[in-house]
Image (cartoon, rainbow, N blue to C red):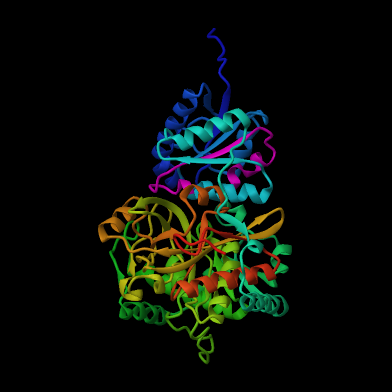
């Protein structure tokens, strides 16, 4: 009998997608990451052992359901050091149940790569653990050999926890707030709490994103209430829209300059029928929002309608744009939400929905562009003197954010491994300019907001294309710089896979928008952190 290993041991689990196609496609990257991570542990005298085997019949080694996650955790000693390794997008609820009762140290780790959304998956899990009150540490690396990673890993192996530099985040109370903006923010908060608003939720809880669900009591305190809608109603309403209306909406976009890469093969190409169905869904979403008096709506889509309809992403981007195809009420007497965007929060992320409501109201008050969207914090690299993030999302990005608006918008088929019925993306390269970024999240049963300033930079075309090809080239991209917030600081503090962004006309206007939104959030009882500085070199007073 071989001698039992005397090395200290940590167990590794890997949460994956629910979709077999995604798990199989992404498994090689996960396997490569696990090999590098295992070698890094071995160099420190530790053994890293998988807590669940690779399934040869499925051809991957991911935990691919909540049921499986619970079964795996039944075999794990709750006091054992545990590593959650992610090189892919993952469904947090697959492992959340087990992690909530695990007593040993927990480390979430992702590979620094844009190939698959591993960083996105890890950030979602981190935000979910924070919301659930689970203690954890987090770490990331490109090759698991750099000094930062090795130093932090040793810290976790010795102490069971990692400390990161989060000095970039300061409570709002430590920032000098102009009295005029403080007063206006308080007034706007009181107005929302008094007159209230409705957030339309097309099926709650997309893709295991526990962090994206705001508890009702916390949302109600802001004056916002959920209208819980069914995606089956959206599907039905989509079927009621006419072919003529779909043609008119499609033709409107083409006349504005959008280019669709159309083909004939439904399984692999973007077809005209897919686009027309998306146009019908767009009209349906506006009519339902009108029916229920919604100020914002969120479509879950991916696991709800994927077998029935094309993707909702083109719909979402149209909704978030002020200049969008007109849609009449059912009786034909009114144009719905004329002259304004309908805030849509991708993947029914309610934290982004509340943020979108605040953003639109603040930017209207200051006469700034109201279009806003969430993006995934997908990846990034240094370019020149800046660390430039790749903010990238499958949908919701409005054409107003692109370099030439609708003229530079493109429609490509959604990747088949995620979207079996295709559908057009709304792809574009975000224009250079000043932005406000933010994230609302849940911690200790209450709402918090991290907010900061930044800019979108214009990269050489070949660099933008390189970044697209290293991520998902069909999706809209934003090349963003977060003022005064480093890569590692954002990763350590950010409590979500998503980040909210909105443009302002210039730096001074963006400063005002950020401060007013922070003041309004404070008035709603949200605990606000101001992150970084007001420019690359200037700190907040």
Q: Which quadrant of the rendered structure holds the N terminus?
A: top right
Q: What residue lies at 67% left-to-right and 29% top-to-bottom?
A: 79
* Farthest bottom residue in view: 333
Of 443 and 280, nearer the camera is 443
Q: Is residue 254 left or right of residue 116?
A: left
Residue 119 in percent (x, y) is at: 47, 47
Is 396 situated above or below 140? below
Examine the image and state in which quarter residue 138 appears: top right
Residue 70 shows up from this direction: yes
Residue 52 in percent (x, y) is at: 54, 31
Of 532 and 7, nearer the camera is 532
Residue 197 in percent (x, y) is at: 66, 76
Q: What residue lies at 59% left-to-right and 38% top-to-bottom?
A: 162
Is 107 situated above or below 322? above
Provide the residue span drawn in magenta. Answer: 92-119
* Farthest left residue in view: 462
Q: Which quadrant of the rendered structure holds the C terminus?
A: bottom right
In reply to whether residue 118 is colored magenta, the answer given is yes
Is 90 situated above or below 534? above
Residue 236 shows up from this direction: no
In reply to whether residue 507 is colored magenta, the answer given is no
Residue 217 in percent (x, y) is at: 74, 63
Q: Is residue 181 left or right of residue 340?
A: right
Is 497 situated above or below 141? below
Examine the image and state in which quarter residue 100 appears: top right
Examine the image and state in which quarter residue 26 appears: top left
Q: What residue lies at 49% left-to-right and 50% top-to-bottom?
A: 120
Of 541 and 532, nearer the camera is 541
**Count of numbered marks:** 0
């Amino acid at each position: 009998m071989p001698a039992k290993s005397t090395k200290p041991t940590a167990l590794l689990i890997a949460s994956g997608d629910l979709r077999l196609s995604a798990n199989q496609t992404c498994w090689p990257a996960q396997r490569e990451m696990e090999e590098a991570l295992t070698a890094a542990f071995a160099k420190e005298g530790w053994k890293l052992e998988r807590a669940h085997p690779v399934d040869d019949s499925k051809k991957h080694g991911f935990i691919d359901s909540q049921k499986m996650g619970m079964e795996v955790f039944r075999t794990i000693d709750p006091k054992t050091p545990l590593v959650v390794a992610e090189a892919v997008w993952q469904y947090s609820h697959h492992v959340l149940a087990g992690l909530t009762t695990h007593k040993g140290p927990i480390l979430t780790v992702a590979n620094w790569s844009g190939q698959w959304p591993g960083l996105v998956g890890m950030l979602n899990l981190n935000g979910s653990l924070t919301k659930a009150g689970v203690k954890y540490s987090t770490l990331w690396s490109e090759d698991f050999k750099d000094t930062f990673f090795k130093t932090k890993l040793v810290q976790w192996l010795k102490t069971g926890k990692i400390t990161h530099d989060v000095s970039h985040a300061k409570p709002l109370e430590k920032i000098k707030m102009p009295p005029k903006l403080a007063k206006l923010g308080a007034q706007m908060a009181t107005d929302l709490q008094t007159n209230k608003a409705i957030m339309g939720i097309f099926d709650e809880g997309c893709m295991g994103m526990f962090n994206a669900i705001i508890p009702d009591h916390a949302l109600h305190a802001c004056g916002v209430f959920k209208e819980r809608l069914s995606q089956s109603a959206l599907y039905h309403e989509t079927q009621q829209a006419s072919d003529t209306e779909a043609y008119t909406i499609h033709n409107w976009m083409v006349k504005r300059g959008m280019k669709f890469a159309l083909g004939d093969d439904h399984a692999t190409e973007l077809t005209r029928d897919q686009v027309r169905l998306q146009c019908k869904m767009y009209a349906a979403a506006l009519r339902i929002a009108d029916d229920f008096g919604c100020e914002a709506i969120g479509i879950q889509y991916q696991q709800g309608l994927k077998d029935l309809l094309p993707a909702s992403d083109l719909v979402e981007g149209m909704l978030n744009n002020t200049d969008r195809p007109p849609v009449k009420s059912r009786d034909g007497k009114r144009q719905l939400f004329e002259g304004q965007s309908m805030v849509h929060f991708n993947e029914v992320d309610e934290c982004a929905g509340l943020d979108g409501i605040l953003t639109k109201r603040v930017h209207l008050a200051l006469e700034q562009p109201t279009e806003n969207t969430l993006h995934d914090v997908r990846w990034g690299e240094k370019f020149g003197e800046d660390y430039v993030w790749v903010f990238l999302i499958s949908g919701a990005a409005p054409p107003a954010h692109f370099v030439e608006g609708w003229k530079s918008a493109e429609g490509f088929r959604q990747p088949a491994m995620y979207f079996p019925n295709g559908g057009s993306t709304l792809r574009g390269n975000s224009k250079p300019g000043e932005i406000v970024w933010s994230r609302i999240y849940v911690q200790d049963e209450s709402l918090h907001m991290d907010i900061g300033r930044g800019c979108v930079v214009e990269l050489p075309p070949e660099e933008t294309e390189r970044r697209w090809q290293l991520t998902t080239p069909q999706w809209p991209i934003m090349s963003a710089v977060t003022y005064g917030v480093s890569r590692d600081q954002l990763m350590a503090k950010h409590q979500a896979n998503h980040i909210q962004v909105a443009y302002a006309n210039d730096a001074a206007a963006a400063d005002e928008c950020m401060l007013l939104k922070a003041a309004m959030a404070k008035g709603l009882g949200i605990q606000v952190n101001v992150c970084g500085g007001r420019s690359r070199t200037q700190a907040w007073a």
